[in-house]
Image (spheres, rainbow, N blue to C red):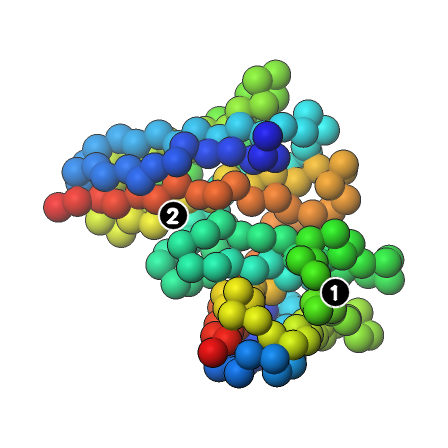
Amino acid sequence: GAGVSQSPSNKVTEKGKDVELRCDPISGHTALYWYRQSLGQGLEFLIYFQGNSAPDKSGLPSDRFSAERTGGSVSTLTIQRTQQEDSAVYLCASSLQGNTIYFGEGSWLTVV
Amino acid sequence: RKEVEQDPGPFNVPEGATVAFNCTYSNSASQSFFWYRQDCRKEPKLLMSVYSSGNEDGRFTAQLNRASQYISLLIRDSKLSDSATYLCVVRGINYGQNFVFGPGTRLSVLP
């Protein structure tokens, strides 16, 4: 597609369940980022992938959060044993060689 | 100290006003600078890159002062459609290739 694609766009899950969020970056973009934004708050960096290099996981808030990027393209962010404080919009972005980043529309997660 | 800081806002201005946003960053090794715009419940979108010599795009002017580690955005003749949150974004080698976002300043342009 032309832009960054994320799915699902909305997800309501029960506390304690695992969720998977998917990101399909812009074709050819080597860098992929995950950010989180709680309501009314700024963007919080989670994880960054660049080509075949080891990902920068320094922003992951706990070991319940993990992410993979398969084949240098699609990425999946997994949250295990979800908590209410995980409720937020999860934004994926991609860039070409570290230039301007382009965001998807986000996955809105609500933990009830 | 946060890596990127911005005016806390919000700014409420009448149509036609000129409004200025300020941003400071802490890492002197920062290499690239941007302003993004985020509408309510939408994803951030690039407004403009910021170059050392300053740059202008229509009603928008961006300035960079590396010595002071300061970035600004000026909006002239503001429109109702300019209402959004403006995000200052910095990227530098010391961050890896990560982009660091400021907390944003919300602007409301009033009729």
Query: SS at mark 2?
Result: strand
Quarter placement of the N terminus of chain A:
bottom right
Which chain is disc 2 placed on? B
> Which mark lies nearer to you, 1 or 2?
1
Q: Residue at x 48, y 75 (%)?
A: A110
In this rendering, does residue B59 appear at all? no
Q: Residues within 10 Å of mark 1 (few under 14, many from 20)?
A: few
Q: Is residue A37 above or below residue B109?
A: below
Expressed as whole percent of the image width and height from the top left, the position of residue B49 reads 54, 40
Numbered tag placed on residue B85 in the rendering? 2
Which amino acid does the dot numbered 2 rest on? Thr
Q: Is residue A72 above or below residue A8?
A: above
Of A58 and A82, nearer the camera is A82
Residue most extreme to the left: B111
In this rendering, does residue A87 appear at all? yes
Which chain is disc 1 placed on? A
- Please state if B99 lies on the left or on the right of A11 as rendered: right
- Please state if B74 lies on the left or on the right of A50 as rendered: left
Expressed as whole percent of the image width and height from the top left, the position of residue B5 reads 51, 33
Q: Residue at x 57, y 18 (%)?
A: B68
Locate residue B10: give its quadrant.
top left
CA–CA distance in space, label 1 to label 2: 31 Å
Query: SS at mark 1?
Result: loop
Numbered tag placed on residue A63 in the rendering? 1
- Please state if B30 lies on the left or on the right of B48 as rendered: right
Q: Residue at x 41, y 32 (%)?
A: B7
